[in-house]
Image (cartoon, grey):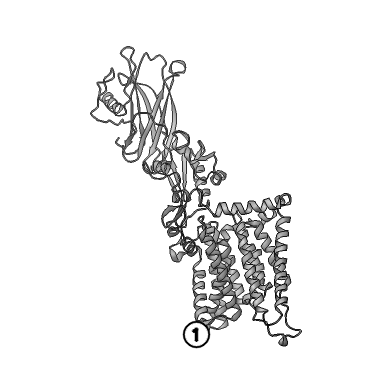
Amino acid sequence: MGLAAFAHRPDHRPVCGAGLSLLRRLAGGRAALLAVLLWATDPFLVAFSRIVHVDALLTSFMTLSLLSALLAFRTLDPPAAAPEALTRQTPPALDWPMLVVSAVAGGLALLTKSPAILLLPMIGVLALFAMIQLWPAISHFRQLALISSSVLIWLSIAAVLWLALWPAAWVDPAGALARVVMQAQYEGGSPHGWGNFFLGQPVNDPGPLFYPVALAFRLTPWASVGLLAALVATLWRRPKDRQRRLLFVLVGYVGCFLLVFTMAPKKFDRYLLPIVPSLQIIAAIGLVVAWRWAARRWSLRPAHQLMLTGVGTAVLLLNLACYHPYAMAYYNPLLGGGSAAANVIPVGWGEGLDQAGAFLQQQFNGCDYPVATWFVPVLQPYSCTPVVPLDWASEPGRVDYAVLYIDQLQRNNRAEITHQLSATQPPLHRVVIHGIPYALIYQLPPTANPPPPVDFGSLVRLYDYAVDDSMLRSDGVITVTTHWQARNQIERDYLMFVHVLDAQGERLGGVDVPPGGPRAPTRVWLPWQYSSWFHPVPLPNELPGWRLLALPGPVRRGERATLATGCACPGPCAGRWWQYALSAIACALMQCSVWTNGARCATITMGYCADNAPPLAG
């Protein structure tokens, strides 16, 4: 738990501080300081250091182990002199304290995640370099003994640390190691369980171009320029000898890492994190070389250099601040930023679902029914109602809202549900962060009766309604339940009138109420949002028999809308103009239900009314 707590710090400054002390001995003060600045402000690294995952922790331990090993084996030092040239001032062949630091960091990396196994061949290669460095100075037997003992010490420290900090290995060390190997083979040797995405298409294995493309999108512009400058400097101007050797070692480490991970069918951009600090170091050396060349060419004074250094530091910090708290949404603006990345590589690690949950909580019915989504555990902390699997959205009446996430959409998971939601209406709300459409929120329609929906102009649709008269004779109340859908933004608060009329057109009872109930005035309805409410209507309970006909129609206060659909419904209420209008719309709704017991009957008229509001023709 202690390691987990360290991994989930809101920054990685302690690791960067340790890296600075190591890099000053490896690359010089100016390159070390710039490398640590690039490292500490890299949005990719910062983002993963803030989530509950181990890739950032693995990156820290592997980088510290590699840098310490470079110092331990004196890889960047020039070859040792011949024996006759050695003096008492000649430094020792190995830096044993740094070897211990490298072994401790390597053991912690192996304890964190299986890709740390790549440190072992790197340690072997650095040991081989050390042997070559010592070739002129000591005998072959002493070389072999020295290097072998150093490698064994490294492995022993790492193994003891691995065993001491993993209680499962205390009981069955061989079994614990076998499970690590098996897990690495299972996860890395098979494609991702729910697919991948590359170059605009859902795929199982993105192929060898995935990591170069993903890395290009994850780099910052200054890191990209620095890497190009390092390449030019190495081929043309050549940095200092120590920096040049460091470049070769880091490029070899990055190349081997990419080669191994490219062969695995399971690919994610976060698997690149362990090489990002090394790339930042390479970029820093390239920028320092370019800076020196520019300072000589344009004769920059120290004051100018200091001012530009301050401006550069401010740009790094400002760039990171602009993406707070969504550093995960940062993609290289030289390649089009997040909007371009969303069309090329997988995007989304849960960012944006907090905004989706906040939007749902703000809706008048956002906490009434469960919400369906693909990533249930990620949305649940931000939801005021239970979050259920996305499959529930295919069953009418089970959920009210569905949240589609970009990662699920890219991989085409549950394509049938996505098509079902998008085929009938646009999303109710989009969560867009730095140009990336992270989440689409749909509201599912209520379970409808056979009548088709009726539109009233371009503003509102009566999706469905029902009338319950079971309580009329006992309590003198009927209940009208309406389901509305906004078609556009509504600027006024309209009322719905439910009036019960007898055969002579006299009012027997009714109510004037907001169509969505008191909690949802029409002004807060969003385009394509559904609103449902039940409306009790008091009536005389001695009505001998009656016929229910419904006319939803937005009108001016005191007026009723008429519709001439050409459909006539026979019955005792037909004959007058308002009765004909009601019959016409009732036939359109396929709701010609008639109860007769004598000559009297009643009708229910539904519609909107608002002071000084223009009529909305149905």
Where 72 falls versus 8 (above or below)?
A: below
Q: Position of residue 124 (x, y in %)?
A: 64, 68
Q: Is residue 244 above or below residue 429?
A: below
Front residue of 578/353: it is 353
Residue 208, x across and y down, in percent:
47, 61
- Disc 1 target residue: 297
The reply to whether residue 458 is visible in this rendering is yes
Q: Is residue 52 visible?
A: no
In the rendered structure, the answer to whether residue 90 lies left or right of residue 443 reads right
- x, y percentage for residue 386? 54, 38
Residue at the extreme right of the image, as rendered: 88
On the picture, is 574 further left or further right than 173? left
Q: Residues within 10 Å of mark 1 (few under 14, many from 20)?
A: few
- Which residue is more in the foreground, 25 or 595? 25
Q: Is residue 517 above or below residue 242?
A: above
Q: Quadrant of residue 606?
A: top left
Q: Residue at x 73, y 71 (%)?
A: 96
Q: Residue furthest front?
A: 141
Q: Secondary structure at mark 1?
A: helix
